Image (cartoon, helix red, strand yellow):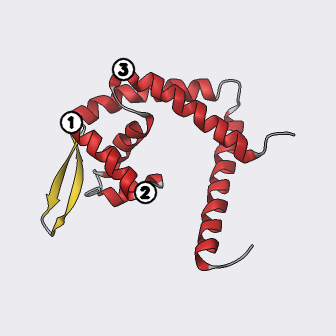
Amino acid sequence: MEKDCGAWINLLSHKVKKRLNGILQDLDITAVQSRVIYYILVHCQDGPVFQRDVENAFGLSRSTATGILQLMEKKGIIHRESVPSDARLKSLVPTQKAVELNAEVSVGLEEMERRLTKGLSSGQVQLFREMAAQMMRNLDEWDRDSSSGAEL
């Protein structure tokens, strides 16, 4: 039987994570941590970034996000600052180490992307992105339908 789309996505995801974790091992961060660093660096320019933002952006549970962020804080990649308007909230602030790691990670990600898309035309890469985005929308819609009690 031919692999379905879900099986291919799962296989690709596993291989990409494994390869990225290997590339990033010398930097003492994981692929997920590298993406969280990038997210925080980009979004902190627009205002404070909170744990819930990371949870939503990456589809993480609260406990998983807490573990990732605590480890990043322990490694000196981020620190948490109280928000003047609400002492219960802590914004995630990248350190200089985060900036430096992000620059090194970018090199590894560029190599990953180059290897991943080798032999594909720019049109094929764009088509893949469009198809993946549609698949994500389909799953998001399914999640909304499931939570509202609607049946397919």
Quadrant containing the N terminus in the rendered view: top right
Residue visible at 37% across and 44% down in the picture: 36
| Residue 130 placement (x, y as % from top left) | 66, 49
Can the viewer see residue 40 in this picture?
no
Q: Is residue 39 above or below residue 151?
A: above
Q: Is residue 31 above or below residue 134?
A: above
Neighbourhood count class around disc 1 (C-alpha, 10 Å): few under 14, some 14–19, many 20 upward: some
Left or right relative to 109: residue 100: left
User: Which of the marked residues, 1 or 3, is nearer the chain's N terminus?
Assistant: 3
Can the viewer see residue 133 in this picture?
yes
Residue visible at 71% across and 24% down in the picture: 119
Q: Secondary structure at mark 1?
A: loop
- Whole-angstrom CA distance, mark 1 to mark 2, is 23 Å
Name the kind of residue labelled 3 in the image. Asp
Q: Toward which corner of the image does residue 27 lie, by quadrant? A: top left
Check residue 61 in the rendering and tell me which mark sits there, or answer none.
2
Q: Is residue 23 above or below residue 30?
A: above
Left or right relative to 149: residue 103: left
Name the kind of residue labelled 1 in the image. Gly
| Residue 4 placement (x, y as % from top left) | 78, 45
Looking at the picture, tell me which residue is in the foreground, 99 or 35: 35
Looking at the picture, tell me which residue is in the foreground, 44 or 76: 76
Looking at the picture, tell me which residue is in the foreground, 5 or 124: 5
Left or right relative to 124: residue 45: left
- Whole-angstrom CA distance, mark 2 to mark 3, is 27 Å
Which residue is most to the right? 1
Residue visible at 75% across and 73% down in the picture: 152
Check residue 76 in the rendering and tell me which mark sits there, or answer none.
1
Residue visible at 63% across and 72% down in the picture: 146
Q: Is residue 44 above or below residue 149?
A: above
Name the kind of residue labelled 2 in the image. Ser
Q: Which residue is mark 3?
A: 26
